[in-house]
Image (cartoon, helix red, strand yellow):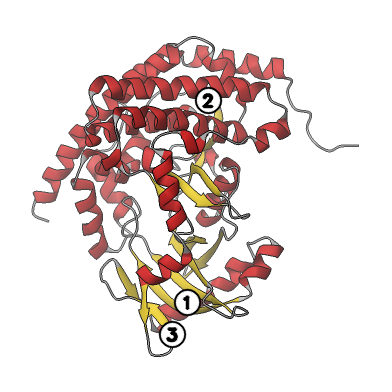
Amino acid sequence: MSTLTPPLSSKERAALGRAARKQLSRGAHASLSLKAVADDPIALLRAAEKDRIKSLVVIKHERMAASAFGFFRGAVPIMAADLAAQPNTGLITQLCGDAHISNLGAYASPDGNLMFDINDFDETIRGPFEFDIKRLATSLILGGREAGVKLAARHEAVAHFTAQYRKLMRAFAALPILELARYQIHRLAHIEPMPSIFAQAERSTAAKTLKSLTTKGESNRVFKSEPPLLRRIGGKEHDLVLAALGPYSRTLQPERRHFLDQYSPVDVGFKVVGTGSVGLRDYVVYLEGTHACKSDPLFLQIKEEPASAYAPYLPEGSQHSHQGHRVMDGQRAMQLTSDPFLGYTAIEGRDYLVRQLNDHKATLDLTTLTADSLLGYADLCGELLARSHARAGDPVAIAAYLGDSCRFDDAILSFAHNYSDQTERYWATFKKSLKKPK
């Protein structure tokens, strides 16, 4: 006899989705009330940075000060608090947590094919599905502004994004379970700006990473010395990083552990990456295959993972005591296929995610965006986010909540426009705070 709890029927799940409209109507998503936000936004940022490497936080602030979109990328703690202050649907799925247009990208699947999906899960947690939609929709507005795309085209992009999400969620609700689990998007290569992203990903090989990050040492290639963005690690810190690979390997599936065991570490470095992650500890390990007759490099990134910025507001959303484990599970839940070397470890009481570095990875170049390519990209964002939420949540309930009308779409457009303006105001305040004497 099965010990599984019998699932709700489709009719019962759809009823739950429609009932959520009484908790929060679709049109109500347009509103943005910040009265219930308890903390000063800049103070929230500072609190999130207090355990980071202070000399690197300066770099983070420089990147955030450069543009409103750059600020938005580094200001997840602010938006998490703002979203938590709004009423929500109560329809829970796995959230990316930091859904924005630069956090989707290409990467190599375990079989070597190029994939394109959400690819940054530092903030992942279980929560109301609309949190991701509101953040990604806002990023379309801000990214479009930075790229010089006109207002009407930015608004059209958000409308396409939400309409595509709603359309695909309805399709996913009707799919058999295993068809949903295997669902692939076959039109990727034909949507602008995807051809250039895939071309960049094709060029982003381990051999290219070897050339760009390392130089000739006395007996082997070693990481370049380009402080503060890249530097070699030695002594105790070097040994601690290599020692962490043992516990990490035990988080891999056995066949993938077997492949990892055929590599030997050559050098260890410290690398600054991204915007929101700057100031956290981020190590890179260069390994070489032991059975190859020529160079066979593998680069692993060992990235510190603090708690999700949403954790104070969604305490039931994560049952993980290890933050690297949280990120790994969230990534596997949302992606169609994940990095074969995805795992986690700990170093001196800090939690880390481990993954391949720069293995055919590529993402959107904002400087190349046009009105047409933003529209195509928005369509793709809607389809990918719907797939991720459907894989990790209840597509029947979400689809029933969204319905067939444009009410939700129109409300999200209004929210995204308003929150983009609010982000501009936060950005201005942030820049002023940098000029104040410490």
Mark 3 or mark 2, earlier in chain: 2
* Cα separation between marks 3 and 2: 55 Å
Report if residue 312 is visible in the image: no
The mark closer to the camera, 1 or 3, is 3
Q: Amino acid at mark 2?
A: Gly
Q: Mark 2 Cα within 10 Å, few/some/many (few <14, many 20+)? A: some
Determine whether the residue tagged by mark 2 lies in a helix, strand or loop.
loop
Image quadrant for the N terminus? top right
Measured as percent of width and height from the top left, residue 331 is found at: 54, 47
Residue denoted by label 2: 90
> Mark 2 and mark 3 in contact (Cβ < 8 Å)?
no
In-front residue for pair 104/185: 185
Classify mark 1: residues with Cα within 10 Å, few (<14), some (14-19) or many (20+). some
In the displayed structure, would residue 290 be above or below residue 317?
below
What residue is shown at x 53% (from left), y 29% (from top)?
A: 386
* Relative image position of residue 124 (x, y in whole percent): 49, 44
Asked if residue 223 can be seen in this view, the reply is yes
The numbered mark, 1 or 2, whose residue comes first in the sequence reads 2
How far separated are the C-alphas under marks 1 and 2? Answer: 42 Å
Residue type at mark 3 is Asn
Q: What residue would you read off at disc 3?
A: 220
In the rendered view, tell whether residue 373 sits above or below residue 302: above
Q: Residue at x 35, y 17 (%)?
A: 30
The residue at which mark 1 appears reads as: 240
Looking at this rendering, what residue extends furthest in the top direction?
405
Q: In this orientation, which residue lies closer to the viewer: 437 or 191?
A: 191
Q: Secondary structure at mark 1?
A: helix
Q: Name the one closer to the observer, 367 or 55.
A: 367
* Front disc: 1 or 2: 1
